[in-house]
Amino acid sequence: MRKLLTLMLLLMFFIPLVSAQDMSYYPDRDAFNHFLNSGSSYTVIPGTSKFSVSWAHYIDSKLSRFKKKGTDVTVLVGNVRENPEMKKLWHLTNLSPEKSLEPMVIVAGRYIFITGREDNIYLTEKAFSGMYRFTPREKWIEILIFLLIVIIFAYALGRSGYSGIFYLISAFLFAVWMVNSRPFPLSPDALPLFGRSVEFAYFGGLSAPSVMLVGSWFKLLSPTEEAFSILQATCILLIISFLYYLAPKRHREYGFILSGLVFASPTFRSYLTTINAYSLPILIFILTLAVALNFTFDPQRLTAFCETLLLALLTVALVYFVPWFLFLPAAFIMAFPKRYVRNYIYLLLSGIGILAVYVYSPFSLSLPVQLPADGVSALMTLFKESAIQLVLIIYLSIGFIRGGIRKTKGQIPFLVILLVIYLYITLWNPRLLPFDYILISALPVRMLSRLTPQT
């Protein structure tokens, strides 16, 4: 099995480059805090490089929420090699010029130097990470996005029984969660993405899809943590919304049970309470499952092709972020063996897309030499926090056996195949753990609907 995984799996997760260096203050953090808490005005002077200009744009956008613009304090951004004004005033710091290449916040009288290179200046975000103040425009946009998503999904789900009412309850619980919690902080692995997205928002150009997505959002709102926090909240609301589509069409109200089972896990919630590399892949994974579990198998060629194309696009996007999901097309074809032409088209489209991903961002094939110690611990945590799901799966399986149900293909076998595969892979790569929570919660909900009498 291990040799098979070595040949078929892509180990590398989508991980941005993170500098091992940390930021520092001079003379100390208190000097910078004094500036932040004072009534002094400020002006920002960037260097000539793209990274210092875009980062100065971020700093200006951030400080403008708390301070007035003026001439009391001058904030210089960049380093002595590309910021002429910083080079001229660097003697005030009593530091070596090479220090300006390190991520630092330096206070020297009425001058503040925010320094670094292109590959590390984003670390100075930590100096502002605890400061949040949403503008009225951002608050209204957040409210409008919430209402738009809730109205669309409540209407779509409301056409099947009481699903719309249950969805509104879920949306209300989400709103209560957001109102009573602090904005989402940036995790260390999200800092490089934040820095590149700030630069994209100011200069544009071609970049990684995630950078263009976040950067475009920054263009709409502002290149700040507040805007990123709104994007994270939107992503979570979409995750809750699309979880309803993992429940059967005749029992969409079971989506309330499914979302409750998933979000009852403290570990799963921990993946969403900070801005990190998990939120978007989790959403794409749920979208992919929603499409796969709701195939209409319409005999009309155009409808069938559009469904297949959508599933292939989502599969490619999922593999781009989580290469381990190369197994998903195989699981789909094993669970839905009929309609061979559709399966061939799906394999062809997803294969071409995955090949393009490989050309765009090459990956390697490898597995750990030994079983990671945190792999077993991750599964033990999953089983402990999913005790209700496990009890339901065992109880409903007994009901299947007593009822003489021998279902070897379809949605339930599809989820079983995925769950078995990715529980095993999680032993070797614990980063797949949040996806296991979704699978282990969706399976008993699907089984429950299969045993529910139809009316």
Image (cartoon, helix red, strand yellow):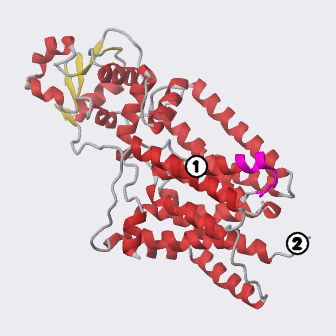
Position of 122 compared to 405: left or right?
left
Upstream in sequence: badge 1 or badge 2 = 1
Residue 95 percent coordinates (x, y): 9, 25
Q: Which residue is mark 1?
A: 349
Look at the picture and state if 149 lies above or below 252: above
Q: Quadrant of the C terminus?
A: bottom right
Look at the picture and state if 314 lies above or below 420: above
Secondary structure category for the residue under label 1: helix
Density class for disc 2 (Cα within 10 Å; few <14, some 14-19, many ≥20) is: few
Position of 304 compared to 269: left or right?
right
Q: Which residue is mark 2?
A: 454
**Residue visible at 62% across and 57% down in the picture:** 344
Q: Which residues are magenta?
A: 296-306
Residue 409 in which image quadrant? bottom right
Density class for disc 1 (Cα within 10 Å; few <14, some 14-19, many ≥20) is: many
Check if residue 100 falls in the magenta segment. Answer: no
